[in-house]
Structures are given as structure tokens and as C-alpha cells.
Amino acid sequence: MPPRQRVYDRAVLIGYDAVSGIEWDRCLRNGLSVGICPRCQHPLKPGQPEEIGRTVWYPATCRSTSCTYETTAHGPRQHLQHGEVGAVTLVFAGDNTNAADVNAIGVVARAVRTTAKSGITSEAGYLRLDDIPVLGGYVYRIITSCLTLDSTVDGEVGAARIRVAQNAAPGTPATTASTQIGMMRDYQDANAQAALTPLVTDYFAPSNGYLSVLLTGQRVTALGTFQIFASATEPCHLIVECTGKDPGDTGVSL
């Protein structure tokens, strides 16, 4: 999976100045100069970077109409002098731990539901996220907002589960028969006082692929009418966040 952002391993040296790749992009967007021409000392105008292999070339031209200095991505690959370098190598996810972590971490998918699902008896799907790109060897935290597991009678027990399905290609949704990786139960003393409880669990991706995440609800005791409640002012969120590299299970069972 291509990284969502890239990490530059060194600055881009143009003219007598050095700028980072991120700063170059900012100057390009805003029409700013990126350095000083080593020939005539006029400002250098940035061009659109071009990626060739794992090197990005940064073409720059002198703003002076009487100067022909330029560094170009399309010119001969001759050795450039120090202070005239117009290229920088990228570090991609997977190349080393630090760059990979920076490129991968963050929220990768989210969903929201603003309506209740009532009349639940056996386990039923409530909210699902499909085709989430995941990287093998990374941890993905799955979080819900506070769930309202509600019933029409006192003494009801309701359950919420997180089920997942990972495949090499997109298009396979998780179902109530998919692998369960998280669960919570709620005992409701009084039907007018439903508890608000979030559900948090982690998924450890064994390989690159596409993940489907399903939030389900179930009436555990056959007493009343069970529902997972949500509304516009009390939405139910389902969030998947990559938290970084999986260090492996190093715990000791006692």
C-alpha cells in the first residue's frame, strides 16, 4: 500500500540555500522562492518535483530574465556541484522503522450512525467499515463511541461485538460469522437507565491486505426488546486507527 505521506531523509540544496522537501512544496504552492541563484544571486523559482525511482528531482530556474541557470529533472544525470543539488532520496514505509511509523500511523477509517436499530434478538450487524488498507506487522486500534445498549425491560443483558475479516483483495465484508476480536456486555438494572459504554480492541495485521470491521449487537437474555440507540445528537462512531508497529506478544501467562 503506498504511504499516505512521505518522509524526506535530508534537505534539498538549491543554489546556496537548503530547504526541506515539505518547505519546497509550500513555496511551490505559494509562488515563493526556494533559494539563491549561484551564478547571479537572484531568487530561484521552484518547479514541479518529479519522482524517478526512489529519488525526487526538484527543478529550479533563476527568476532573472538574463540568467539561464537551472536544475532540471529532465536534463543529463551529470554530477551536480554542492549547492546546486536538485534531488533528494525518499524514505518509504517499510524501509526503516521510524519512517514507516510516521507514514502509517493515524486514523485510517471511520463511520458514524445516527439512527437506532431496535428489535434485536440474535446477533445482528449495526455498523460496518469495508476495504480498509492495512499493513502487515502493524497494530490497528478499533474504537467506538459510548454505546447505548437499551431494552424495554429491567434486568436485560445486551452485548456488542467487533468482528473482522481481512483479505488480500477488497470486496469481502465482515459478517456475524467473522472472527470476533472484541466484546462487551451490559446489564441494565432499569430500562430507563441504559449504561453508556465504549468498546475498544486491537487488530494485529498479519499481512498487507484489506480489512472489514463490523460492529454488532445481540440480546443475551430473552426478556424484552433490545436495541442499540443512536441519534443525530447521540451518534455512534466506529473508528480504526493505526497506532504503529506490532512489537509482538512478549507477555508471560501466570
Image (cartoon, rainbow, N blue to C red):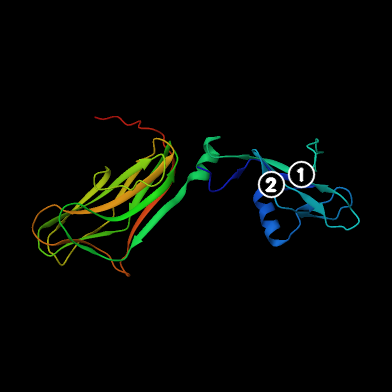
Identity, as a three-letter code, of the amino acid under mark 1: His
Residue at (38%, 40%) from the top-left corner? 167
**Disc 2 to disc 1, how far (Cα)?**
9 Å
**Image-based side of 102 in relation to 187, left or right:** right
Res 229 quadrant in image? bottom left
Residue at (38%, 32%) from the top-left corner? 248
Instruction: Indicate which disc residue 167 carries.
Output: none
Q: Position of residue 179 (x, y in %)?
A: 27, 41
Q: Secondary structure at mark 1?
A: loop
Identity, as a three-letter code, of the amino acid under mark 2: Glu
Q: Residue furthest right?
A: 66
Q: Position of residue 227 (x, y in %)?
A: 19, 61
Residue position marked by numbered label 2 in the rendering? 50
**Image-based side of 56 in relation to 248, left or right:** right
Residue position marked by numbered label 1 in the rendering? 74
* Front residue of this view, candidates 43 and 166: 166
Please report whichever mark, 2 or 1, sits nearer to the chain's N-terminal start.
2
Q: Secondary structure at mark 2?
A: strand
Labels 2 and 1 touching (C-beta < 8 A): yes
Q: Position of residue 107 (x, y in %)?
A: 44, 52
Q: Position of residue 1 (x, y in %)?
A: 50, 42
Res 92 quadrant in image? top right
